[in-house]
Image: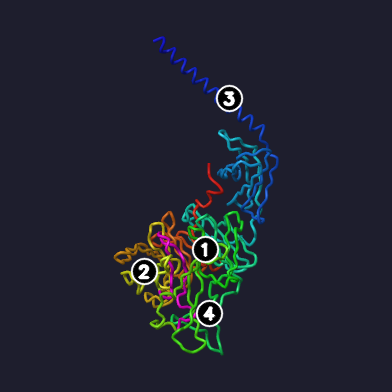
Amino acid sequence: MHNVYLSLFQMNKKNILVSLFIVALLYGGYYFYSHDIQIVNIQLSSPDNSAIKEDIRIQLNKPATVYVEYWAGKDGKHYLTPVRQAATEHLINLLLLEAETDYHYRIVLDRLVPIKSKTMHFQTRKQSPWMVHDWIKENHPHDAGALGEGLTMLCYREFPGYIAMVDGKGVIKWYWQEEKMGVRIASLTPRGTVLALLAPVGKDEFAKPQENKPFVKSGLGYSLRTGKTGFMGGTELVEIDLTGYVRWRLNTDKLGMIVHHDLRMDQSNHIVAVVRDYILDERKQGIPRDTLWGDGVVVMDTTGKVLKKWSAWDQWDTAKDVRLDSLKHDRFHINTISFDKDSNYIVSSPIENQVWKIDAQTGKTLWRLGKGGDFQMNASDYFYFQHAPHINQEGDLMLFDNGDFSPRDSSTTNKVSRALSFTLNTEEKTATKKLDVPLPNKQYTARMGSAYLLPNGNILQTSSKTGSVLISDKLGKVLWELNTYFIPYRAEYVPDSLWKKYRRTE
């Protein structure tokens, strides 16, 4: 027994010695680094004179890995920036800050035992007057939690244009401004940036009256756009990272290409954009023949080199098209490009009241959903002049049904716009409605708009013509309303995970 106790004592003594050695090593390392690595200079600046972001430039006497810990006020939530690789100079971006707020921060050497500098502070400036707006009205639904942890992104199309990301309290948390052009639309990219379409204000072209005749009317009863630009046309593409840095900018007008309505970046970092496209009317023998305007999808790299093109005219039988004469200025009005789970294209032709799936490699139309399409569906589930079809996180096809020219509603006062989603059986060609979430009648919008399923199960919808972005539950009860004070083409959800490259929590 005595030998057993002795053996245990020797083991404990060994463990104690090892522990003391580790403590001594850590203390020695702490002493060495805290005395050997020194901060030579710290410089703070607000990029673009922004009130909601701050750049910290750190200069060290020797290369070291560092990050910044920061928080608002005395008891604010602590955030950590990602660890920067060993270097003597570091540029660290603090994003999503609050305007006119005191912040505390520490520079931290990334070690087994982190070495923190003394606590320092800075104050963000007062918000820019043009961004101060009554985004949330107290007499409207304003449950800040309805949006969840993310933001919603929308674009200002007039001059000067901007992209804004707004939180559930109606506070702009991120923005990018363009001084000379309007921002038509913007979308998030697979590499965590923002892709946007810009255009000079007043670039839109509609059918112009000639010889005192009224505007050209389509068979649907509305004025058509004309020429290559048309409605929602843009002349420049730009990719912006979340610090506001412009990665590249491309003038498509100089390439003889007018992008309009929608564009996305695919997994190969190529731009996939809807463009105006035309053919000459082969039905008529006269010269010059009429120009028939339609749409196409172009794939290009970020230098503007066209890699591939699909045209809606490729598989269209103009000889059998009884509406071609009345719609020759705008036959398809394709307003959306998105990707199915297999990376093929989902496009929307509101004039046909259909959503099409296009093979991205061959350009073949794989199926058409909607009235007169390939899927069996109830007549009450037909959609009219729809926008923003996409595959949501549940794998269903979701879209915004504007409801224009709908036989459901005989009077303007009864017209309804709504979010719809369908579970598609592409083998048996059946479409089963899963979501049907109407907007209030007062938020009916004949044009534009969007609908997205949020991670928390709520529905984010844009009523463009009324200048509203709304969140409702799946029964249509409005929980939150954003007063945009302008006409937003659409509003997309921005997940909180987008910012993981720039900040994390303790």
Q: Which residue is identified by label 2?
A: 367
Q: Which residues are magenta?
A: 325-352
Q: Where is residue 338 shown, x and y percent of the image? A: 45, 64
> Label 4, label 2: how many angstroms apart (C-alpha)?
29 Å
**Viewer-nearest of discs 1 and 3:** 1
Q: Amino acid at mark 3?
A: Ala
Circle number at residue 271: 1
> Label 3, label 4: how many angstroms apart (C-alpha)?
79 Å
Q: Please check the rendered image and state whether residue 330 is part of the magenta-colored stretch, yes or no.
A: yes
In the image, farthest residue toward the left: 428
**Viewer-nearest of discs 4 and 1:** 1
Element on which disc 4 rests: loop
Q: Amino acid at mark 1?
A: Ile
Q: Which residue is identified by label 3?
A: 24
In front of the other: 115 or 304: 304
Q: Specify which label sits upstream in the sequence, 1 or 2.
A: 1
Q: Specify which label sits upstream in the sequence, 4 or 2.
A: 4
Q: Specify which label sits upstream in the sequence, 2 or 3.
A: 3
- Can you tell which quarter of the image residue 332 is in? bottom left
In the image, farthest residue toward the top: 2
Q: Where is residue 448 shown, x and y percent of the image? A: 48, 70
Q: Which residue is identified by label 4?
A: 226
> Label 1, label 3: how many angstroms apart (C-alpha)?
56 Å
Q: Is residue 374 visible?
A: yes
Q: Where is residue 415 shown, x and y percent of the image? A: 42, 73
Question: How many residues crowd mark 2 within 10 Å: few (<14), some (14–19), many (20+)?
Answer: some
